[in-house]
Amino acid sequence: MAFSGSPFHHHLKGLTTEYERLVAENAELRKELHKDPLRALAKDGETVKPVLAVVAPLKPACLELPGSVPTDTDSAPQGPGDPPPSLDERRKSLTTPITPRSSKSSLHTPRGGKARVHDASPEDNSTFLLLLDIVPAGVILVNAAVAGISADMDPDNPMWQVLEICFTIFFIAEIIVKLKIFSPREYLFGPDWYWSWFDILCVVLALVDLTLTISAETDVQFTTTTAVPSNATPCAPDAVATATGEGSGDASVASSLKMLKLARLGRIIRLLKFKIFTELKLMIQGVFTGLRVLFWAVVLLLLCMYLLGVVTKTLFSKYEEFEYVPDAMFTNFRCFTDGCAALDGTPLQERLRREEGYGIFMFAYILLYLFVTIGIFNLIMAVFIDNVADGSTKKRQRELGENAPRTEWVLATSLRQLILTKLFHEETKDMSHISEEERKRILNEKLEKLRQMYGYMPHSAQEYEALADDIRTDMTNRKVVVTQDQFNRWLCTEKDLISKLEDAEIDLSCKSDLFEVLDADLSGELEFDEMIDGLLKCRGPVSKTDIISIRLKTALLVKMMQDQVMLEQSRLALRRLQARNAELEQEVDMENRAFFTAGEVALSFREQTEVCTMAHAGHAVAAWKRIRTGGKALAVAWVLSAAVNFAAPGSADDRIPLESLKVGTEVDAQILAKHRFSGWFVNIGTERSAFLEFEEACDGFPTEGMNTWLRGSTLTARVLENDGKKIWLTTRSGSLERPKRFRTPPEESQIAEFSGISSEEWVDAEVCGMFPKGAWVRMTTPSTRTDFRCLLRKEHFTESFVEQSHIGMKIQVRVLEVNLAQKQLYLSMLEPQDVPTEP
């Protein structure tokens, strides 16, 4: 009852209606699907076709696809630095026949344009790029092997220098080829710019090494032939050295040449780019990640060794191994790591144990050894491993975030190609009017054009995002969905898709469960956006963000369930209250029927009140006429008996005249009868019985005497009002003024005006009557400003109202529910949290 008019209640109703509509729509769509794994929905009002005839909106037949050879002088291949072409620029009519290009002509531009690897067919592109990585890797390994062999086998052999020149020329040619293929901007400032500059640095070092080597050999040969005496033997190196003037400068040049030769071996680092060396790359990255921890570990170890060195130098300074603090530090370090031996090779700890005291030295040595080896060394190892693991995890998460646009584009491209290929196969099957060979030719042409559509390769995160958004928009406009059977078939048969999912670090150990994970709405079908978003969320390991997201969504779900439970409890309480009201109304109706019915005709509540008022005043004839004019038949005997019942007992001579009783006069009264909704008929010794209303029974809400004042009970009251025909009494304190009663019942139109008022909003009201079950309040409609009487039940009173209530009191209430059928407003003076759930 408290939630029936709240925004949450309306929102819940809207969600329920939308859910029912979606369930019905899904049922209809599944009927249309039948056994087709893919479907494309047409626009509203069009017939749903099983497959689509085109991949994209048609363009003129002369439009070229990205990746094809330009056909006019204005068409120039696009560089990687230029903005990516839009999806519409890259589409082409798939009904226009094309001529397949050979692999030879696809790698160059016939009009002298700059050749690009992206202009080739996919097979040529992948093969060429693979060779462009594998061949240099093999040459690097051969160069490293030659460097190792030449250091041991005849280092002065000219053959090694020739091989070094060949290696240098090859690496220079590699850089030139990559600059020509990828463009200088992409190669030097693209995603792999650090590898490009590393290659250039290695080539520069190789050129410097060759230059210095050839220059040094030329100088040596020239000096040898001009300065060596004729009588000197060729094998006299001292004479040659003296004649040539070799000294410390030549030694430094030779050392520089050796260092340059060793620096060239750094090119081996390039091998880390390949997937086969992933574990080696992780270990190297872990070493660099833990360098800071390793530095502080060395500081901690040095500090410990310094303290031990100072102590041992002080205690054992007579021994040569502990003569100075550095010597003592080094000796201690050897005792805890390599071996604790004296300078003469004997065990040092055994000598100290025998010469310096057995017990004390042995106990101290064991403690220190355990503290350093088990404590400090293991602590350093644990911190180092934890730092490396944490750094590796953070780096992996960072790489996942950086690669998200590219991964999204790769997955979207692969899935779109699979979907459109499936549609093309379905289209060709429907071409029954042409031959089988013609259908195969058309299918091959469309597939070839589909492959060429993906010729453009993005080069930045912005381009990846733009192209992925284009693909999403294209697939959304086609309204294509994938069923579980088709998706599972792809995971079992499409190796290219499986490879891309593994590269994206998506777990495929349970392929049959992946569809259920992606199908968040449990519709049994995957839309394109739903499929891409789900796959992107499945990448990599579980992160802290995923756990917090699940926790927050679970908390929201629990809150919604609690609100739903509270709403159901309120509805149950409302139904119980309505049932109780119906029982009370039925009980009242049965009592009134038993009292007011003559034969099978009953009076309404208003007619009952009017007849009762006339009858107890002794106006039997007027009561009878009122009933007759209202269309009801009532026996004269009942009217007469009612007049007798409500008349005061005693003889006419003993009765007190009505005119003698002034307002404020105290009288002794005796209860004659009780009216359920008005009060008590009492005998005060007058000709006509007086009436004590419920509102006048006590101060505040009339709780006293409700059940104790029965027929025959006596009490003392004061005259409240005397109009010469009827007397009203009161037993409360305060002023003797009887407010005018308001009894106008509500109309349906008046009740309807409160439908738009929230249950949280307070409305002004005025107390116009009270009885044991509640209070009558005067309400004013918000629009028409008309007044009517409404019931405020006792369960919804505040404590202050029970103590201070009186006729005419201004209060504020909330409209809990509007019941147009019964023309009722359910009101409450309580706060929302204090509203009772039980009637």
Image: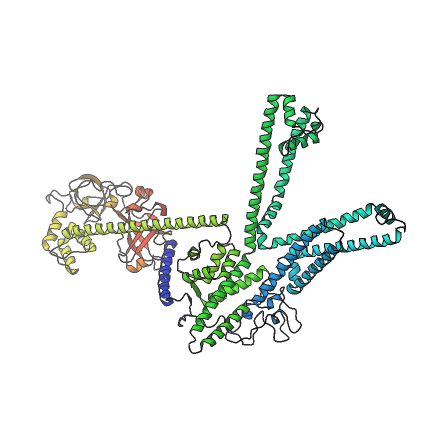
Residue 102, compared with residue 167, is above or below; it is below
Residue 520 location (% of width, % of height): 42, 56
The quarter holding residue 292 reads: top right
Left-right relation of 233 to 338: right
Residue 321 location (% of width, % of height): 70, 28
Q: Nearer the viewer, residue 199 or 617?
A: 199
Can residue 813 be seen in this snapshot? no
Residue 193 location (% of width, % of height): 65, 57
Left-right relation of 429 to 588: right
Can residue 53 be seen in this snapshot? yes
Q: Nearer the viewer, residue 443 or 805?
A: 443
Residue 271, compared with residue 325, is above or below; it is below
The quarter holding residue 423 reads: bottom left
Residue 94, compared with residue 598, is above or below; it is below
Question: What is the image's colouring?
Answer: rainbow
Q: How many marks?
A: 0
